[in-house]
Image (cartoon, rainbow, N blue to C red):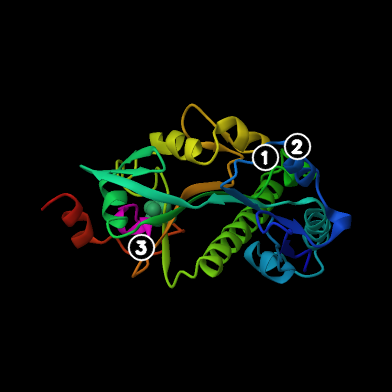
Amino acid sequence: MSVSFAIPDKTGRAFRSANVNKAPPFHERLCNDKLPPVNKILSPAFDLSLKEIKADLSIKPGSNSDAQIEKILNQVERIARPKALYRVAYIEKRGHETVMIDQTEFHSRALYANLETVGRVFPYIATCGTEVDGIPIEREDAVQRHWFNTIRLALLRASIQHLRKTIQDQYQLETHSAMNPGSGEAGVWPIEQQRALFSLLGGQQWIENTMGVHLLDSYLMTHEMTVSGILFPSKTTYYNCQLCRRDDCPGRQAHFDVALWENLQGK
Ligand code: SF4
């Protein structure tokens, strides 16, 4: 189910939907809100596969659920607007387990180690967008809520993939990795540093106005289908999961790396 595709605007700073009939209010807001000059906002294409989503949700062809999910997906393709925000930033100083990025200090031994030989990084936020929340589903129905979350996760993944590909292509990165505050074992990159990350990306209010992403006092984000982090060039791919012992996680991408963990602990 192909919905739209994204193309750069004339300045190359922002992307807009190629399908003008689907231009969302978000794009209008972009013109009104002051865009920090270094920030770039992407409005990623998404291509939700009806077949894959039905398979993920174990929906039988011809069933009532089959008709319902198709109706929901048709609405999603009309109104969903996943988004991604990023900027280019430079490492100015390194201290004891700290890294100063464009006048913003981050504390994390793992971040320090990952950025030890790096000069340029790409702080980012990617979200499935708040627009999709306007789809009328039965909120009391646990099954429909599960469908809805699966669809929103697919939109978030589309947003992250588009962001990573855009940065990789535009800045000619051979390999890259990402770290996210609060991911991995406690203290790997403390979630409290979301505040510094938001500051680096234009501030909480600006991000809320343009992306619809709100930073809570708990440092979690709403809309909850949102990811924030720093992307960086790397010789090999680093995964947060390498520094995470949670073994019942369905999202695990790599094994816990004992040697890396011990190395970071100075053992
Ligand atoms: S194992 Fe799961 S919780 Fe731990 S970092 Fe990976 S995805 Fe996150």
Left or right: 148 in relation to 198: right
Name the residue beneath numbered marker 2: 32
Q: Residue at x 71, y 68 (%)?
A: 49
Q: Report how far apart the C-alphas of labels 1 and 2 lie in the structure.
A: 10 Å
Q: Report how far apart the C-alphas of labels 1 and 3 lie in the structure.
A: 30 Å
Quarter assignment of residue 10:
bottom right
Secondary structure beneath dot 1 equals: helix
Q: Report how far apart the C-alphas of labels 2 and 3 lie in the structure.
A: 38 Å
Secondary structure beneath dot 2 equals: helix
Residue type indicated by callout 1: Thr
Quarter assignment of residue 234:
bottom left
Reply yes or no: does residue 244 show up in magenta: yes
Q: Which residues are magenta?
A: 238-248
Kindly identify which numbered label has been placed on residue 210: 1
Discs 2/3, front: 2
Q: Residue at x 43, y 36 (%)?
A: 196
Q: Residue at x 80, y 51 (%)?
A: 79
Discs 1/2, front: 2
Q: 184 or 53, which lies in front? A: 184
- Asked whether residue 248 appears in the rendered view, the answer is no
For disc 2, the neighbor class at 10 Å (few under 14, some 14 to 19, many from 20) is few
Quadrant for ligand 1? bottom left
Name the residue beneath numbered marker 3: 238
Q: Earlier in the sequence, mark 1 or mark 2?
A: 2
For disc 1, the neighbor class at 10 Å (few under 14, some 14 to 19, many from 20) is many
Left or right: 216 in relation to 62: left
Question: Where the N terminus falls, by quadrant?
Answer: bottom right
Q: Earlier in the sequence, mark 1 or mark 3?
A: 1
- Asked whether residue 63 appears in the rendered view, the answer is yes
Q: 16 or 55, which lies in front? A: 16
For disc 3, the neighbor class at 10 Å (few under 14, some 14 to 19, many from 20) is some
Q: Residue at x 78, y 42 (%)?
A: 134
